[in-house]
Image (cartoon, grey):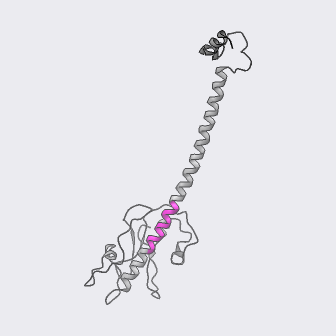
Amino acid sequence: MNASERTRLTNPAFFRRPPVIPGQPPVKGIASPRRAGGFTYLALMIAVALMGFGLAAYGELYSHAAQREKERELLFIGGQFRDAIASYYNRSPGAKVYPKKLEDLVEDKRFPMPQHHLRRVYRDPITDSIDWGLVEAPGGGFMGVYSHSEEAPIKSGNFDVPDAAFEGADRYTKWTFSYSPPGSGQAVAPAKGR
């Protein structure tokens, strides 16, 4: 390679596109900068649209998974409340009575040494509050709890035996976790405002 060729290759202008002269056809093999920009913009818009659809589908999937997890947690916590109410009722000294308030399940002061039927008043995973609906018991107090959420549950069937009554419920407020003694014939009365 001679000196003039080396100088030409080291010159940055050598690698630039030839100028487009109006009225002359562009040099073959080189796309017009205006046309290339349009295709790039179109490809970018298609990529953004596809990413948007993908993110929307992922968001929907994540939302359903989170809702199903909240339902599993509600079923577990409701079972804990049901068991605590049964324990409170069955361990009653003298006549069997239901608890008057949720705190009675945490610390039962009817005994010389307070009994604990529940570790704490659990939060409702659907509403994220400790404000539970209470199912009134026939002789006073409450015999069950339910969520105040009016949302429609995803789970509509295939419940465990204690929760079989939830089959086909159209709102979480119809998922009542209540205890009635075997053979008592007490039915769960719908609470006011449900």
Based on the displayed image, in which of its 4 quarters is residue 119 positioned? bottom left
* Residue 152 can be seen, yes or no: no
Of the pair 21 and 117, the residue shown nearer to us: 21
Q: Which residues are magenta?
A: 67-79
Is 68 in the magenta? yes
Of the pair 96 and 28, the residue shown nearer to us: 28
Percent position (x, y) of residue 105?
A: 34, 76
Q: Give me the residue at 62% from left, 38% from top.
A: 47
Percent position (x, y) of residue 177?
A: 45, 74
Based on the displayed image, in which of its 4 quarters is residue 156 positioned? bottom right
Locate the C terminus by quadrant. bottom left
For the stretch drawn in magenta, the main secondary structure is helix
Locate the N terminus by quadrant. top right
Question: Where is 170 relative to 137, above or below?
Answer: above
Q: Give me the residue at 31% from left, 76% from top.
A: 104
Question: Where is 96 relative to 44, above or below?
Answer: below
* Residue 113 can be seen, yes or no: yes
Based on the displayed image, in which of its 4 quarters is residue 181 positioned? bottom left
Percent position (x, y) of residue 129?
A: 38, 62
Is 177 in the magenta? no
Percent position (x, y) of residue 138?
A: 38, 81
Question: Where is 30 relative to 156, above or below?
Answer: above
- Left or right of 58? Residue 113 is left
Q: Give me the residue at 54% from left, 54% from top.
A: 62
- Left or right of 115? Residue 189 is right
- Residue farthest along the front direction in this orientation: 2
- Left or right of 165? Residue 95 is left
